[in-house]
Image (cartoon, rainbow, N blue to C red):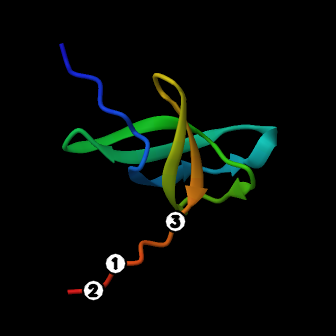
Amino acid sequence: MVAYVSAIGRTGVITVATRGRDGPGEVLVQIRGGSEAFIAWSDEPLPAGTSVLVIDERGTRTVDVSPWDDPLAGQA
């Protein structure tokens, strides 16, 4: 049995565009030492390739996401 690990606060990349409140897409989230696909909802449509932050969970494999620009990216 694998222990529950929350996706909230994790980052990911949209793999299937979201349509805002009109429908979900898919996000690949870095979690549990790897990457896992989740159904992704967002307030505004987000195209594939958008970096996102998981801000809430709607259930086991469904999350709410927001666009994310990592403030530490590129810093050594």
Q: Closer to the N terminus: mark 2 or mark 3?
A: 3
- Disc 1 + disc 3, Cβ < 8 Å: no
Residue at 79% of width from left, 42% of height from top? 21
Residue 56: quarter of image: top right
1 and 2 marks in contact (CB < 8 Å):
yes
Say which of 74 and 5 sits in front: 5
Residue appearing at x 51%, y 58% in the figure: 52
Read off the residue under disc 3. 68
The tag on residue 75 is: 2
Residue 2 image-quadrant placement: top left
Q: Classify 52 as above or below 30.
A: below
Question: Does dot 2 land on a helix, a strand or a loop?
Answer: loop
Q: Report how far apart the C-alphas of labels 1 and 2 lie in the structure.
A: 6 Å
Count of numbered labels shown in the rendering: 3
Q: Kindly identify the amino acid type of the residue bearing the numbered disc 1.
A: Leu
How far across and down, in percent of the image, does residue 22 sit? 81, 40
- CA distance for labels 2 and 3: 16 Å
Task: Bin the neighbour count of mark 1 within 10 Å (Cα to Cα): few under 14, some 14-19, many 20 and up.
Answer: few
Residue 40 in picture, x, y percent from top left = 58, 40
The amino acid beneath tag 3 is: Trp
Characterize the local packing of mark 2: few (<14), some (14-19) or many (20 or more) Cα atoms within 10 angstroms: few
Residue sitting at x 23%, y 38%: 32
Q: Which quarter of the image is occupied by the C terminus?
A: bottom left
Mark number displayed over residue 72: 1
Q: Residue furthest right?
A: 22
Q: Position of residue 70 (x, y in %)?
A: 42, 72
Q: Circle 1 — which element?
A: loop
Residue at image position (67%, 47%) is 42
Q: CA distance from mark 1 to mark 3?
A: 11 Å
19 and 32: which is toward the camera: 32
